[in-house]
Amino acid sequence: MREARAFTLPMAARAHLAILVVVVLWAGSFSVIKTLLDHGVAAVDVALLRYAVAAPGFALVLWRAGGLPGLTRRDAARLAAVGLLVVVGYHVFLNLGTGHTTSGIAALVVALAPAMTLALALSLGLDRLLVRHVLGLGIAFAGVAIVIALGTGREISLQSARGPLLVLGAPLSFALYNVVLKPLLARYDLVALTAASSLIGMAGLVPFVRGSTVDAVTGATAADAALILYLGVLATFLGYILWNAGLRGLGPTRAVTYTYAISPLAVLIGAVALGETVTPWLVAGGALVVGGIALAQRTSTTQRVAAGARVWRSAPSHGET
């Protein structure tokens, strides 16, 4: 028993550490994106260069996972939709919107992704509606409304709301991604699915290559190149590896709990690194978003035991930025 305990405790510690590193990497990526946009890198080019850097790693993961044997034509079409939603849809909306708002507000709007996923699942009859779902979703959506309308501290206008409204396309894309992906989970390895969807999404970004993309590469300063490497290597590929490592060690219930810290930490990083203003309304709205999502996603003791008993080999890496 002592030997088993001595073996499992370090594993649990490593899992906690892995998830903590992911939280910091994903929270920091909002400020990195905002900095690149402020330096004149186009929103689509930020997404393109990020996945161009991460693509070789995902190709290696897909090869090591054995690919997707037995993939049918219908499932291939679904996988293509998944890749376009989670890479093109999510990142283009996020980057376009962040260019017109602060990184902290963008992070709080993106935090709505689990609530949108749940709302979509409930509307399609994929989940059973409970009172806590209604309360949690209502609180979370009210929080985002406060963040969009009052979070900047400026007078309410279409101009001030433009960025956050564009960012809303990112969590919506991620919610659709989760719903479209679900039927594939029972038939294929999730590691391979995640890697394949990332590569398909990268291919979906290729038509957006323009002269500005080439200029962004050839004219990048050392600082901008380092930021792009941060997004591609650390936040995207390494984040995927560490998230899966943490998920294996902790299980989904405990791992997901850590993600509630991403948006508040992103707000803090934006305030410290970029000098972004943190208004009382932003704090209040953010608290409602995080609290509402936590309430809506709260599981019963029976559900927690069942979740812990499953074998979780991996999880999608795109619930970040």
Image (spheres, grey):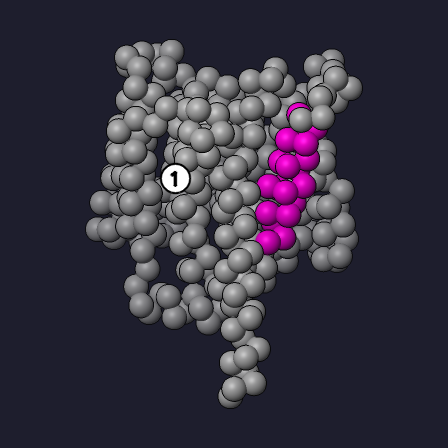
Which residue is more in the foreground, 219 or 207?
219
Q: Residues within 10 Å of mark 1 (few under 14, many from 20)?
A: many
How many numbered marks, from 0 up? 1
306 sits to left or right of 45:
left
270 sits to left or right of 73:
left
Where 84 sits versus 239, above or below?
A: above
- The residue at 30%/26% (across/down) is 279
- The residue at 56%/24% (across/down) is 35
Q: Main secondary structure of the magenta part?
A: helix
Secondary structure beneath label 1: helix
Residue 108, quarter of the rendered image = top left
Where 150 sits versus 63, above or below?
A: above
Q: Position of residue 78 (x, y in %)?
A: 59, 42
| Residue 102 can be seen in this image | yes
- The residue at 54%/79% (across/down) is 6
Where 154 sits versus 7, above or below?
A: above
Residue closest to the far bottom = 1
Q: Position of residue 239 (x, y in %)?
A: 59, 47
Q: Position of residue 151 (x, y in %)?
A: 32, 24
- The residue at 71%/26% (across/down) is 222
The amino acid beneath tag 1 is: Pro
211 sits to left or right of 97:
right
The residue under label 1 is 264
Which residue is more in the foreground, 279 or 218?
279
Residues drawn in magenta:
224-242
Is residue 286 rendered magenta in the image?
no
Residue 114, quarter of the rendered image = top left
Which residue is more in the foreground, 165 or 150?
150
| Residue 213 can be seen in this image | no
